[in-house]
Amino acid sequence: MMQTIEATLDEIGQLHFAEPVKINGTQRVLVTLLNAPASAPPKSITARGAMKGMLSSVDEFIANKALEIALEEKQ
């Protein structure tokens, strides 16, 4: 199962996850560097507020969900 997990990458290459992550064994990962300054991770994320301001429209959400499903089907 593919997951997206927010993290920050420090100057020496260490990842710091925004939330606790349980990892079983070695995992293959992809890292995308964002052109935005890292901010302190929120204390808690609710399902209602986690995506607030990140998507501009319902159409964009549907398009992103379709892409996610397509990627999962390739596995």
Image: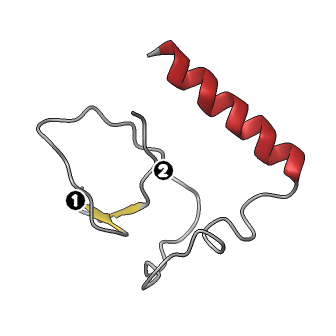
Badge 2: how crowded within 10 Å, few (<14), some, or many (20+)?
few
Where in the figure is residue 73, as x and y percent of width and height? Answer: 54, 17
The residue under label 1 is 14
Farthest residue to the top: give it. 74
Give the residue at x 21% y 61%.
12
The answer to which quarter of the image holds residue 26 is: top left
SS class, disc 1: loop
The answer to which quarter of the image holds residue 20 is: bottom left
11 sits left or right of 25 in the view: right
SS class, disc 2: loop
Residue situated in front as seen by the camera: 46 or 6:
46
Where the C terminus falls, by quadrant?
top left
The answer to which quarter of the image holds residue 65 is: top right
Rendered position, 1 above or below 52: above
Farthest residue to the left: give it. 25
29 sits left or right of 65 in the view: left
Nearer the N terminus, badge 2 or badge 1? Answer: 1
Amino acid at dot 2? Leu
Give the residue at x 22% y 35%.
27
The residue under label 2 is 33
Rendered position, 41 above or below 64: below
Where in the figure is residue 35, as x and y percent of width and height? Answer: 58, 58
Rendered position, 7 above or below 52: above
Where the N terminus falls, by quadrant?
top left
Residue situated in front as seen by the camera: 39 or 10:
39
What is the CA distance from the residue labelled 2 to the residue labelled 1? Answer: 13 Å
Badge 1: how crowded within 10 Å, few (<14), some, or many (20+)?
few
